[in-house]
Structures are given as C-alpha cells and as structure tokens.
C-alpha cells in the first residue's frame, strides 16, 4: 500500500490517492467521515473548525460500496476557498494584481516551516510555504487512515487513541484495555479521567488567555495484532522503526516511544523484559507489556502501544520575535488563524497515521489481491503461531 496527498491549506481541495487496497472490501463513506469529524473536534480548536466541515467524496476505486483493487481517490473540499480564490487561485496575475496582493507573508514564525521552506524553494512570499506545511494536510492523512482502519477491522485488528498529557497535566492512572476502549470519546479532550480532563481544559483556557499555545502526549493502541509483522533482518523492515518515522512526520510531533518508552532506561532488565508464557487456547503471550508489543522490530502479539509527543503550535496570538525577509528588520512574527491546543485532534491524526503503517505492513506480509484471500492468509498465520 502507498498513498499520495496534494492540496494547500486554503486551496480548493485536498486530494488523496491510495494504491494497494485489496478488492471487494466494503467501504462506507460515512465511516470515513465519522473519523474526519473526530479530527475537527477537541477542546482548544480555533475558528477554522467552525468554517470547515470536512467530508470525503470518493471519486475512484470504489463501486457500489466495494473496492475494485484499483487506486482509490478521495477528495476533501475546502469550503473556505471561496474567500481565498484571489489569493490562492491557480490563474496567473496581472502586474497590478501582484502589487496589490493581500496576505503576503514576509515575517516567518519561529518553530514553523516558513523561513527554511522559503530559503529552500526561493519563495519570497512565505504563504507558498505555510499553505502546504500547514497541519491542514493531516485531514487527508486521516482519510487514508480511515480506509486503513476499515481494512484492519475486517481482519479483527482494532486501533484507538487517547490523550495522556496536555501542558504538563498528566493522566497517569493505570487502565485496562477495556476501560480505555470504553471511554475514549466521552469528553472533548479525549482523556479517560474526567477530573484530569477538567484540569486540561483549564490549562488550555489559560494558554488562550495568554495568547500562547501548549502541546502534550498522545497514546495509540493497536489491539489483536498478529505476531511476527515486521522483521529483524534489516533496519528498514523493522516495524517499530517505520512507525516511529510515520509518527514524527506528523506536524509538530517531536518524539515517539513504545510501551514504557524512555522509562526503560531507568529500570533494570528484570523489570522491563516481558516474560513469556503459553496457553494452548491462545498460544504464546507475555506476562507484561513494558516493551509495547515489540521485540526485535516485530510485533509479538501483545497490544502495540505508541506514545507521540506534540510540541506547542508555533502560531501564537502573542507572537515571538522574527525578522522580515524583505527589510531584514526585527518584527513580531505573522499571526495566522490557529488553535491554542490541538492535542486532542492530534491523537486522532496519530491514530490514523499508525493505522496506515500497520495496514501497509499487513499487506506486505500477506500478498493478497482481494479481501477474502487476505482474511484467509491472516487466519492461517494466526493458526500457525498458535501451534508453533
């Protein structure tokens, strides 16, 4: 499986092409749109989420509700484009229109791609950078992940996410897998504990009042993953390595860990290695899951647990110092429409980025042209592992 996205933040649409989804998989666009809606929610989001109501249109690769095996094309229309047509349109401008162009950006924001992107591609109007580097592109990636989740669900593999920290406020209670699954979406910060959730809201409110932004940590769990997906034989086939790259590729994500993550450096091996046990009904399993479902770059059959750290959003309503690229004078950075906190939405994005990488690894492990063939291959693999 692979995919390609295109589109700018205030352009007419985002477009996704997904290749490699097996034929005869039942696809309901409402299931995709339900995931898109989750990305737009969450406490701390800005005004754009009130303007854009993201929904997906499927324009290829699906007929009468079932995949064809050919590339799937998804379109997400930007409703706000009608207000940006003069600024973001594809048609050439006259000299007068160029001189009177509104919303030209020459003051890069610290922490954003503005300045370095302008230097790389020789853009004097930094809008040419920020429009594509914007987190708006993650809407397309959620659409890809939503299709991936449908595929994985057909294989009895489930993926879900939650927020475990915002602005230093942590939900460090221990929960069972069932408790997490049952309480993910019951509040607007996607935090399991309601008391902690309220403290997170207060922290977000304070950041907004201060014209500031805050980040946090999200957790993604993959349940019922077959053992042996990935490989130990070469660096670029290690599944945890590929997931790490995918998570850190999300806008503003600066760190990733598995299971207990960096805490493993603080403890002896006797407290970290997951002891192995066997049951004739379920096969091999671990007595703990400190390593987050991975050994040697491969899934070991335990739930995969991934943590992603998101930095505060770089667009601040109390902007930091910057330099105008035309005059070279000191200025306050440009203010663009933004959120004071997007961690709840980021947990949804992270979940869907992980979903694609898991689906891609599954399709590499079990070469299949249609969903029945894939389901049989996964079932046979599970039986093999059970009787090993």
Image (cartoon, rainbow, N blue to C red):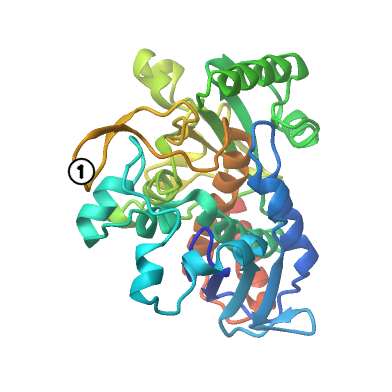
Q: Few, some or many C-alpha atoms within 10 Å of disc 1 (few <14, some 14-19, many ≥20)?
A: few
Q: Mark 1 points at which residue?
A: 327
Q: In which quarter of the image is residue 147?
A: bottom right
Q: With respect to residue 15, does 279 lie above or below?
A: above
**Is residue 176 among what the camera can see?**
yes
Q: Could you tell me which residue is drawn at 51 percent across and 75 percent down?
A: 367
**Where residue 81 sits: x, y (%)?**
60, 65
The total number of labels drawn is 1
**Where residue 70 sits: x, y (%)?**
58, 85
Looking at the image, the residue that sits furthest to the front is 96
**Could you say which is closer to the camera, residue 321 or residue 243?**
321
Q: Could you tell me which residue is drawn at 71 percent across and 75 percent down?
A: 25
Q: Could you tell me which residue is drawn at 20 percent across and 53 percent down?
A: 119
**Is residue 285 among what the camera can see?**
no
**Where residue 133 sits: x, y (%)?**
41, 53
**Could you say which is closer to the camera, residue 106 or residue 145?**
106
**Could you say which is closer to the camera, residue 16 or residue 213?**
213
**Where residue 90 sits: x, y (%)?**
45, 76
Looking at the image, residue 214 sits to the left or right of residue 255; the answer is right
- Secondary structure at badge 1 equals loop
Q: Could you tell me which residue is drawn at 32 percent across and 42 percent down?
A: 107
């Amino acid at each position: 499986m692979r995919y390609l996205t295109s589109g700018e933040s205030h352009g007419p649409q985002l477009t996704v092409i997904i290749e490699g989804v097996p034929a005869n998989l039942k696809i309901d666009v409402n299931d995709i749109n339900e995931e898109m809606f989750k990305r737009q929610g969450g406490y701390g989001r800005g005004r754009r989420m009130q303007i854009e109501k993201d929904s997906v249109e499927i324009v290829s690769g699906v007929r009468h509700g079932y995949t064809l095996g050919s590339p799937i094309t998804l379109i997400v229309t930007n409703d706000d484009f009608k207000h940006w047509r003069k600024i973001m349109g594809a048609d050439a401008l006259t000299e007068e229109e160029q001189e009177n162009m509104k919303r030209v950006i020459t003051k890069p924001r610290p922490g954003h791609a503005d300045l370095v992107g302008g230097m790389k591609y020789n853009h004097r109007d930094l809008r040419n950078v920020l429009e594509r580097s914007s987190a708006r592109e993650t809407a397309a990636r959620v659409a890809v992940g939503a299709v991936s989740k449908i595929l994985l669900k057909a294989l009895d593999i489930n993926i879900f996410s939650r927020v475990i920290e915002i602005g230093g406020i942590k939900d460090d209670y221990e929960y069972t897998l069932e408790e997490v699954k049952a309480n993910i979406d019951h509040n607007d910060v996607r935090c399991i504990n309601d008391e902690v959730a309220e403290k997170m809201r207060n922290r977000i409110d304070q950041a907004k009042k201060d014209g500031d932004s805050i980040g946090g940590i999200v957790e993604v769990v993959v349940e019922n993953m077959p053992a042996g997906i990935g490989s130990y034989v070469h660096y670029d086939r290690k599944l945890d390595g590929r997931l790490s790259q995918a998570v850190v590729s999300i806008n503003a994500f600066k760190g990733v860990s598995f299971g207990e993550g960096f805490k493993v450096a603080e403890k002896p091996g006797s407290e970290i290695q997951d002891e192995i046990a066997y049951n004739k009904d379920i096969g091999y399993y671990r007595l703990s899951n400190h390593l987050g479902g991975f050994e040697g770059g491969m899934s070991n059959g335990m739930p995969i647990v991934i943590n992603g750290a998101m930095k505060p959003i770089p667009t601040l309503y109390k902007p930091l110092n910057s330099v105008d690229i035309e005059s070279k004078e000191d200025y306050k950075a440009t203010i663009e429409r933004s959120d004071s906190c997007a961690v709840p939405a980021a947990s949804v994005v992270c979940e869907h980025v992980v979903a694609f990488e898991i689906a891609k690894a599954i399709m590499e492990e079990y070469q299949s042209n249609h969903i029945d063939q894939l389901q049989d291959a996964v079932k046979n693999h599970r039986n093999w592992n059970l009787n090993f």
